Image (cartoon, rainbow, N blue to C red):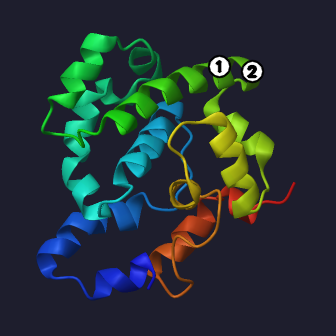
Amino acid sequence: MSYCSAIEYMSEEKKAIHKTYHDQHYGFPIHDDNELFCRLILEINQAGLSWETILKKEAGFRKAYSNFNIKKVAAYTEADRERLMADPGIIRNRLKINAAIENAKTILQLQKEHGSFEKWIAFHHPKTKEEWVKIFKKTFKFTGGEIVNEFLMSIGCLPGAHDTSCKVYKKIQQAKPLWLTKQ
């Protein structure tokens, strides 16, 4: 069942949690590297958990990870790692925390080489999901097939974020996501 279809069957309380993300963020292109980093870290932290858990904790993640400022997170020390492990506002998983810090360092290097994280993604476009997974596994920490697929769909790089019958689908098309472009 797609995210669009799943929302139809949610309680009003759950719909309230998901609506803004579904209607205004999921599948739309992101042009800010810090926000791309944010989405990658949220997707990594969702592994093994529900997306609802992540949505409920997003504000906590933003606070804990310096609003996903790549330079700041890349400079985190062992004391920061311990601070994050003690923070109930986020997912306290050492592998996921280490991945966030190491991936920030990787993105800084990609920015030097390509000008931005967004340009690095565009440089590799278009790719199949399988090709993307290989690139991400080679480049980043804690990025398996589902994480890579959801990350790329959520930022408009791969199709499938919304059903064609979903009211948001046309808005996504107007935003010109990468999956609509050919290289």
Residue 78 is left or right of residue 145, and the answer is left
Residue nearest the viewer, comparing 142 with 119: 142
The furthest residue to the right: 183
Quarter of the C terminus within the rendering: bottom right
Residue drawn 53% across and 75% down? 169
Residue type highlighted by circle 2: Glu
Residue 15 is left or right of residue 162, and the answer is left
* Residue 62 locus on image (x, y percent): 28, 34
* Residue 136 locus on image (x, y percent): 65, 44
Residue drawn 40% across and 29% down? 98
Residue 168 is left or right of residue 160, and the answer is left
Residue 23 is left or right of residue 107, and the answer is left
Residue nearest the viewer, comparing 4 with 98: 98
Which residue is denoted by mark 1 in the rendering? Answer: 109
* Residue 109 locus on image (x, y percent): 65, 19
Image position of 140 with respect to 173: above or below: above
User: How far apart are labels 1 and 2 at the CA level?
Assistant: 6 Å
Residue nearest the viewer, comparing 97 with 174: 97
Determine which quarter of the picture holds residue 3: bottom left
Residue drawn 50% across and 43% down? 142
Within 10 Å of disc 1 (Cα), the crowding (few <14, some 14-19, many 20+) is some
* Residue 68 locus on image (x, y percent): 38, 30
Mark 1 secondary-structure assignment: helix
Quarter of the N terminus within the rendering: bottom left
Residue drawn 43% across and 25% down? 101
Determine which quarter of the picture holds residue 130: bottom right
Which residue is denoted by mark 2 in the rendering? Answer: 113
For the residues bearing labels 1 and 2, Cβ distance under 8 angstroms: yes
Residue type highlighted by circle 1: Gln
Mark 2 secondary-structure assignment: helix
